[in-house]
Image (cartoon, rainbow, N blue to C red):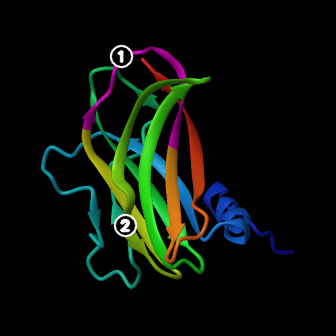
Amino acid sequence: MRALILTSAAVLMLASAASAQVYATSVTAAVPDPNGKVPGFNKVPGSAIENWANGVAQMVLTGGQTYNFCVSLGSAKANGAAGVSWTLSRKANIIQNGTIVAPGGLPVGPNGVWYLCSGYTALNSNPGKAVLTGIVTYTPTGGGKTTNSDVHVDVVLK
């Protein structure tokens, strides 16, 4: 008997593809590389697939520490432009947020995959449980309805 195991990103992609043309697939916060080698795209020599390198995603974030906030996204039948941002919140209160690409700043086409990072951002001190959200805003070429897709990860701030 074979079992089909889907990661949360795969389930999100399956659910989102039917309703959105561009969709968020992951959000992470990683400690910066002091040697400047990561984040990077296609950093694995000899790989036959596109890949990205980033610091290990952190679940416990420390106030005052610098992090690289990254959001991945994919497209189905897209033809337009997107914006990418992240938010760190607790209930309805935004603790911190940032724009990775301004709305309309990322041209997107069909069957694409992107991985974009904020650059290094110092985290505000605000201890407790929080939610890290990656947000993708998509506007089709020719004016159609702008849509949002987001993905959430629970984190702890210390």
Taking the image as drawn, is residue 59 in sight? Answer: no
Q: Is residue 133 left or right of residue 42?
A: right
Disc 1 element: loop
- Residue 10: x percent and y percent? 65, 64
The magenta-colored residue range is 121-133
| Label 1 vs label 2, nearer the camera | 2
- The question of residue 59 being in magenta is answered with no
What's the amino acid at mark 2? Answer: Leu
Q: Residues within 10 Å of mark 1 (few under 14, many from 20)?
A: some
Query: Which residue lies at the image location 15% right of the left edge and 43% below the top edge?
Result: 34
In the rendered view, would you say 73 is above or below 134? below
- Magenta region, main secondary structure: strand
In the rendered view, would you say 105 is above or below 142? above
- The question of residue 128 being in magenta is answered with yes
Disc 2 element: strand
Q: Residues within 10 Å of mark 2 (few under 14, many from 20)?
A: some
Looking at marks 1 and 2 on the same chain, the residue that comes earlier in the sequence is marked by 2
Query: Which residue lies at the image location 30% right of the left edge and 73% below the top edge?
Result: 42
* Quadrant for the N terminus in the image: bottom right
Q: Is residue 98 left or right of residue 137?
A: left
What's the amino acid at mark 1? Answer: Ser
- Determine which residue is flagged by label 1: 125
- Residue 4: x percent and y percent? 77, 69
How many numbered tags mark residues here? Answer: 2
Of all residues, the one furthest to the front in this rendering is 143
- Residue 50: x percent and y percent? 39, 77
- Determine which residue is flagged by label 2: 106
In the rendered view, would you say 94 is above or below 80? above
Q: CA distance from mark 1 to mark 2?
A: 31 Å
Taking the image as drawn, is residue 18 in sight? Answer: yes
